[in-house]
């Protein structure tokens, strides 16, 4: 699994990430699940984000989603505001 970044070593050029649903969920289930995790999208909008919201995460409220595992969870916040993040801190 790898991220296809359009340029390297400069975050302002990271515009073409090309994440795939299966690769990302594999990453979540095999790497991230060792700790509680918070994922935010910022202002980006990709089709695979909508797939994650529909098929992988459970909607909690508005734009906040959650995936529960045995002892940890992953929060996914789509286009978050400060008000969305504050209760999770």
Image (tube, grey):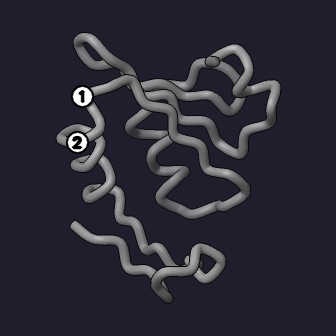
Query: Residue 34: which numbered mark, if any?
Result: 1
Of residue 64 and residue 55, the one placed in the foreground of this image is: 64
In the rendered view, tell whether residue 74 sits above or below residue 6.
Answer: above
Horizontal side of 11 relative to 67 (left or right) equals right
Q: Where is residue 62 in the image (x, y as percent from the top left)?
A: 72, 27
- The answer to which quarter of the image holds residue 72 is top left
Q: Position of residue 83 (x, y in %)?
A: 81, 25
Horizontal side of 4 relative to 79 (left or right) equals left
Q: Name the residue under label 2.
A: 31
Give the Cα separation between the discs numbered 1 and 2.
Answer: 7 Å
Q: Where is residue 45 in the image (x, y as percent from the top left)?
A: 64, 61
Name of the residue lying farthest toward the left: 30
- Residues marked 1 and 2 touching at CB (< 8 Å): yes
Secondary structure, mark 2, is: loop
Query: Residue 74: which numbered mark, if any?
Result: none
Residue at (27% x, 71% y) in the render: 2
Of residue 20 and residue 41, the one placed in the foreground of this image is: 41
């Amino acid at each position: 699994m790898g991220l296809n970044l359009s340029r390297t070593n400069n975050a302002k050029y990271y515009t073409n990430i090309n994440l795939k649903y299966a690769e990302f969920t594999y990453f979540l289930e095999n790497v991230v699940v060792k700790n509680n995790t918070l994922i935010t999208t910022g202002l980006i909008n990709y089709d695979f984000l909508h797939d994650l919201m529909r098929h992988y995460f459970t909607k909690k409220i508005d734009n906040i989603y959650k995936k529960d595992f045995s002892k940890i969870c992953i929060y996914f916040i789509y286009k978050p505001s400060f008000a969305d993040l504050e209760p999770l801190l």
